[in-house]
Image (cartoon, grey):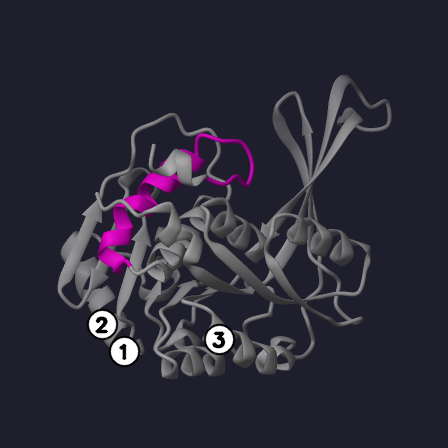
């Protein structure tokens, strides 16, 4: 496996663009059932807040030792200011556009006895294309970065991503996309998209053999002018489909504790490595190792340079 020096990693600059969210965790003791309804009563003893969505992707980039900038649009509410402060603490450069009509996405998880009892989502879909207002900022940031990562969580922030992709393409920047939804036409001309099995099935339909999969992915790549498609297959590892064929890496066998955010870690690692000058094929086994490490941790977690190259 190719190793990359800490200096090279530190010089890599990744611009992350996409939907951010604040992940809130409320931990508590569960001692009794409510007299009002057959539900547990959780006495909250501790609260925690973490970067979610594209903010977690950017956090993964900096934890690896690379540099990250985060371009996004949020509401003008308590959650957005909390999130921006949280992101800035990690050394990520923040470029937060604010829109008073938008409610910043918050995912609140209530945890009792080591398990998630409930998740509450606070969000609204933007009425207009909010990131369009950020296009000028994107153009300024583009030349200062080595790789561009679009993190689409289907919250509406990347509905018109095509302009940004084409601008990045013109500048010769590698473009990595974590896709959402059943229409990938807006991602055309990207360097690589990284769907999981369920996400890819929504777009190309199911497959009963590797050969059918191979043909369908080739058609998708040609149709959308993508350099590559990286299919993440949880316990089956990952497969990179590109012009020269395919490269498969097996999952790193270890105890799977929590798969939350594993996709974020994989694409963040790929972007940092490609930004540092590696090819997609060279970056793949390292990103696979990063995904294997992060599923052994609880919640949206990250991987350090030391862990990755230990």
| SS under mark 1 | helix
Give the labeled residue for mark 3: 142
- Which quadrant of the figure contains the N terminus? top left
Residue 62: give x, y in percent of width and height.
51, 50
| SS under mark 2 | helix
Whether the magenta-drawn stretch holds residue 277 is answered as no
User: For the point 40% across and 54% down, which residue is it?
Assistant: 267
- What is the CA distance from the residue labelled 3 to the residue labelled 1? 26 Å
- In-image side of 74 versus 206 (left or right): right
Question: Height in image: 193 above or below 79?
Answer: below
Check residue 120 in the rendering and tell me which mark sits there, or answer none.
none
Q: Nearer the viewer, residue 295 or 175?
A: 175
Closer to the observer: label 3 or label 1?
A: 3
Question: Height in image: 179 above or below 46?
Answer: below
- Which quadrant of the figure contains the C terminus? top left
- In-image side of 133 versus 67 (left or right): right
Give the labeled residue for mark 2: 219
Asked if residue 198 can be seen in this view, the reply is no
Closer to the observer: label 3 or label 2?
A: 3
Confirm or deny contact between disc 3 and disc 2 (CB under 8 A). Answer: no
Check residue 223 in the rendering and tell me which mark sits there, or answer none.
1
């Amino acid at each position: 496996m190719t190793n990359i020096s800490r200096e090279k990693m530190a010089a890599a600059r990744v611009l992350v663009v996409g939907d951010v969210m604040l992940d809130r965790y409320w931990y508590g003791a569960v001692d009794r059932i409510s007299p009002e309804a057959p539900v547990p009563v959780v006495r909250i003893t501790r609260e925690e807040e973490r970067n979610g969505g594209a903010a977690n992707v950017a956090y993964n980039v900096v934890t690896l030792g690379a540099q990250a900038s985060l371009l996004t649009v949020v509401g003008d509410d308590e959650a957005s200011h909390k999130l921006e402060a949280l992101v800035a603490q990690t050394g990520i450069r923040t470029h937060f556009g604010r829109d008073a009509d938008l409610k910043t996405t918050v995912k609140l998880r209530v945890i009792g006895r080591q398990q998630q009892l409930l998740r509450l989502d606070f969000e609204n879909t933007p009425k207009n294309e909010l990131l369009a207002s950020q296009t000028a900022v994107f153009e300024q940031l583009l030349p200062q970065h080595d790789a561009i990562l679009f993190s689409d969580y289907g919250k509406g922030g990347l509905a018109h991503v095509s302009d940004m992709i084409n601008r990045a393409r013109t500048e010769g920047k590698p473009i990595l996309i974590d896709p959402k939804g059943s229409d990938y036409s807006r991602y055309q001309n990207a360097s690589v998209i990284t769907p999981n099995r369920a996400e890819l099935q929504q777009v190309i339909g199911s497959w009963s053999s590797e050969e059918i999969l191979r043909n369908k992915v080739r058609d998708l790549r040609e149709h959308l002018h993508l350099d590559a498609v990286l299919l993440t297959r949880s316990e089956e590892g990952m497969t990179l489909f590109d012009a020269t064929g395919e490269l498969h890496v097996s999952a790193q066998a270890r105890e799977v504790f929590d798969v939350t955010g594993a996709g974020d870690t994989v694409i963040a690692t790929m972007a940092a490595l490609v930004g540092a000058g590696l090819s997609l094929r060279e970056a793949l086994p390292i990103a696979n190792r990063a995904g294997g490490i992060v599923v052994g941790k609880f919640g949206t977690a990250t991987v350090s340079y030391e862990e990755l190259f230990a």
